[in-house]
Image: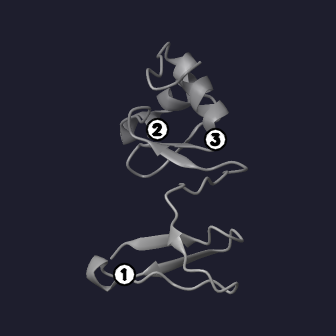
């Protein structure tokens, strides 16, 4: 079921409702006016390091055991499958440079 967002055109009060489309009802605001659909997407900001798992930058588990992965990527961490564990976007860029790779999804 989708979440519908509503906004009061008079005072700007916001509300939401989780319901099926056929059960959608427009709530009344505290100021007495009927709310309307709010089509503005909510923006969220993400702060701090967000760990990610990179299969593309991963290695075979035998390369971890032999030390070859440590030679190519000093200080890198890997999970049991050989996928690289990256702590943030800056580290991802560094690891790509170590292999002379380019992220085609990046703007810079």
Residue pointed to by mark 1: 24
Where does residue 13 sit, x and y in percent of width and height?
Answer: 68, 74
Where does residue 71 sit, x and y in percent of width and height?
Answer: 56, 24
Q: Is residue 29 above or below residue 71?
A: below
Q: Nearer the viewer, residue 55 or 102?
A: 102
Horizontally, residue 12 falls left or right of residue 108, namely right
Q: Which mark is residue 64?
A: 2
Q: Is residue 32 above or below residue 39?
A: below
Q: Nearer the viewer, residue 63 or 33?
A: 33
Q: Earlier in the sequence, mark 2 or mark 3?
A: 2
Circle nearer the viewer, 3 or 1 = 1
Report helix, strand or loop for mark 2.
helix
Report helix, strand or loop for mark 3.
loop
Of all residues, the one furthest to the top in this rendering is: 100
Which quadrant of the figure contains the N terminus? bottom left
Residue pointed to by mark 3: 88
Where does residue 14 sit, x and y in percent of width and height?
Answer: 63, 73
Residue at 55 percent across and 76 percent down: it is 35
Q: Residues within 10 Å of mark 3 (few under 14, many from 20)?
A: few
Horizontally, residue 56 falls left or right of residue 71, namely left
Of all residues, the one furthest to the left in this rendering is: 22
């Amino acid at each position: 079921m989708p979440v519908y967002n509503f906004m009061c055109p008079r005072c700007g009060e916001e509300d939401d409702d989780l319901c099926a489309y056929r059960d959608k009802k427009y709530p009344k605001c505290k100021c007495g006016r009927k709310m309307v659909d709010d089509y503005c997407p909510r923006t969220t900001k993400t702060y701090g390091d967000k760990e990610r798992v990179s299969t593309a930058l991963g290695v075979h588990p035998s390369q971890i055991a032999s030390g070859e992965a440590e030679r190519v990527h000093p200080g890198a961490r890997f999970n049991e499958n050989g996928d690289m564990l990256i702590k943030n976007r800056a580290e991802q860029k560094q690891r790509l440079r170590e292999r002379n790779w380019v992220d085609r999804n990046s703007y810079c």
